[in-house]
Amino acid sequence: VTSAPRERSPRLAATLLIEGGFVVTVDANARVIDDGAVAIRDGIIVDVGPTAEVAARIGPEAERIDARGCIVVPGFVNTHQHLWYGLFKGLGGGLLLERWVEQLLLPTAASITAADAAVSSYLCAFEMLASGTTTCLDHSVTATDTSWVDGVLRAVDRAGIRTMYCKEIRPSSAGDPLATAEEVHARWHGAAGGRIGIGFVVESTAHWVAARLVSEDLILGAHGLATNLGTRLSNHTAGGTMAVEFGYLESVRRTGRTDIGFLHGLGVLDDRWVLAHALNVRDRDIELLACSGAGVAHTPTSESCRGGGIAPVRRMRGAGVPVALGSDGPMVDTSVDMIEQMKVALMLQNQLHLDPAALTPYDVLAMGTIEGARIMGLEDQIGSLEPGKRADIAVFDLDGPGDAVWHDPIAALVLSKHGTDAVHVLVDGELLVRDGTYTRLDAAELAALAVEARCHAVEAAARAGIDAPKWAFR
Ligand SMILES: [Zn+2]
């Protein structure tokens, strides 16, 4: 896993034409094109429009991908993910967040190794690619050093997925936490032709501050560093259960301090933040978010698995807060499927508001694509199908038995497809999944990777003292 990036899969002709599909651009005009085409040259989208027009402009030499019967969308952007959680799938059931942190996160985080994280990241990258996800933000929750980061980033580079790795800045990080973070940024930001970016993680939620896992000085220092380097800060915010006896809400009840109000009070709440969860935000918090430009990574399946409640997504969007989607780590809900995030986000809001149009299929598709790019600061590069953007594209077949009949292809994608249904997935114009098959990994390599990941998972769980079911992996 940690060897050098392999050769890119053989390039197609200089120009690639995805033609004949139902193209949903998710651009500023929400343009959809029946029998549409996307032309790609040197990793960049160079033309989008009706197939006949684009084909005439591009000429006959382009290599063609037949997308008839398919929907063509921007690759999905997963704005909150923990790649090493992939080794602990299936162990988090039945636990409220606060118990899950004590019983699962703390022991696993203390025992996982850099090699475990690299293998999990590599496997998880392929799981995401198969589900049409082309970009993810990996939020570090462990105290890591540069060799750990190198292992994870070599793995995702090898898989080909676009990744923003957010390096934790906390007192327990190796060496001087700010200097190490800056070193990681200098080493990796913009690597792999720009596919890899570096942001930072600062945890400022009430329990962390109370437990002295972070200090106000460190939050200010990290924000200053992110501002100087022009990058993002990922942060778990206003999460936890709806219980007021413990966790975040207990802290709010006792102190009157909300996570958003705290950042505002420190003078650092601005558009650098990718705020995961934002589950228990109050009206004043929503106003502060809207004024600041900070982004929210809504994680609906994660909250649902833990019985954590429903974030006020419609109210935040209505106030002008950019809200994107994230899967959270697979140690929580066991899946990184972004279509699942879209569907669950829609259903939860419709239930919460007793309104079947609280969120529409198009709304959640935008949250899973352009809104994700926006809150990660990448909206000029990815998130929509427009000339000049990087060619990060997912193609889903709408000809299967479950969706051969549809009247609204966007609803069909969001409500009846599954992440694993992507037929073609491109990052930077490279077909990483073609006809449902990985191009950078053959079947034997995939099988070997699965065995390797299982071995790491069993050993890591044992080291953590986790009482995994005896039937695991039999
Ligand atoms: Zn998280």
Image: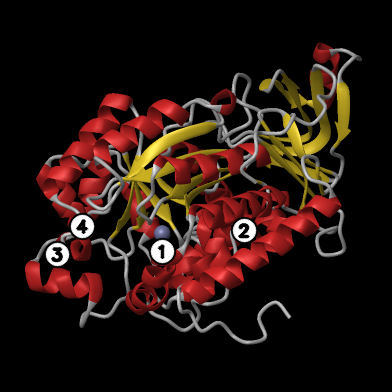
Residue 307 appears in which quarter of the rendering?
bottom left
Left or right of 201, for residue 11: right
Residue under pointer 3? 210
Q: Can residue 354 be seen in this snapshot?
A: no
Q: Amino acid at mark 1?
A: Ala
Q: Which of the two discs, 1 and 2, labels the residue nearer the N terminus?
A: 1
Q: Which of the two discs, 2 and 3, labels the residue nearer the N terminus?
A: 3
Residue 178 appears in which quarter of the rendering?
top left
Q: How far is the residue under mark 1 from the one under mark 2?
A: 23 Å
Q: Secondary structure at mark 1?
A: helix
Q: How far is the residue under mark 3 from the one under mark 1?
A: 20 Å
* Image spot of residue 53 (x, y percent): 81, 19
Q: How far is the residue under mark 4 from the one under mark 2?
A: 28 Å
Which quadrant: the C terminus? bottom right
Q: Amino acid at mark 2?
A: Asp
Residue 256 vs residue 14, the one in the foreground: 14
Q: Can residue 453 be seen in this snapshot?
A: yes
Q: Which of the two discs, 3 and 1, labels the residue nearer the N terminus?
A: 1
Q: How far is the residue under mark 3 from the one under mark 4?
A: 12 Å
